[in-house]
Image (tube, helix red, strand yellow):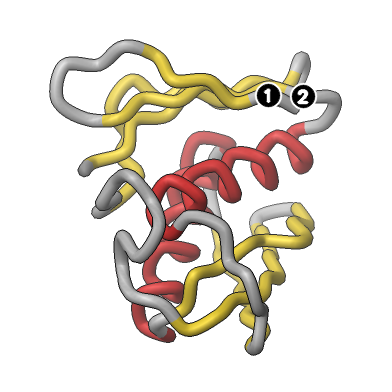
Amino acid sequence: MPVESIEHTADVRLRAWGRSFQGTLLELSNHMLKMVYGEPLHPVSTLESTVEYDSDEDCVIRLLNDIIYRAESSNLAVRVRKVTICKGKIHWEGYGETAGRNSGGSALVKAATYDRIVARRSPPLVEITLDI
């Protein structure tokens, strides 16, 4: 399930697609986290969270922003290992190691934005702009 960068003047714009919407969100989440933290080497802690959403676009934004918030507040370089979508809720589980922002990554991502967001379930496709 690939993720690619799309040209954007000031921020980072990503396009992700795959066989399922859930899998696409998993790959997109980990791509974003790799940009920020690099690869965690020794996972020592687990994280999980559930957020509510109203639309597919809202699902993507709330998921990515929740992951950013949880990683930063826990001071962990996180990898998401599972994403589960239920009606109106998305749950994610991950693991991480103690790290600071930009400890091994190439970008300082502040938030996922609603700027020109695309979120489709069939075929699964997400295009998102990350505020850096």
Label drawn at residue 18:
2
Name the residue beneath numbered marker 1. 2
Compute the Cα span from label 1 to label 2: 7 Å
Which residue shows up at 47% across the image and 45% down it? Answer: 32
Q: How many numbered discs, if any?
A: 2
30 vs 24: above or below: below
Residue 27, image x and y in percent? 67, 40
Q: Quadrant of the N terminus?
A: top right
**Could you tell me if residue 27 is visible in this image?**
yes
- Mark before the other along the chain sequence, 1 or 2: 1
Q: Which mark is residue 112?
A: none
Q: Label 2 neighbourhood size at 10 Å, few (<14), some (14-19), many (20+)?
A: some
Left or right relative to 78: residue 43:
right
Whole-percent x and y of residue 65?
40, 57
Instruction: Evaluate if marks 1 and 2 touch, with contact meaning CB atoms under 8 Å apart.
Output: yes
Is residue 76 rendered to the left or right of residue 20? left
91 to 124, vertically: above or below: below
Please name the residue shown 55% across and 46% down the image: 59
Which residue lies most toward the left here?
A: 10
Q: Residue at x 62, y 62 (%)?
A: 79
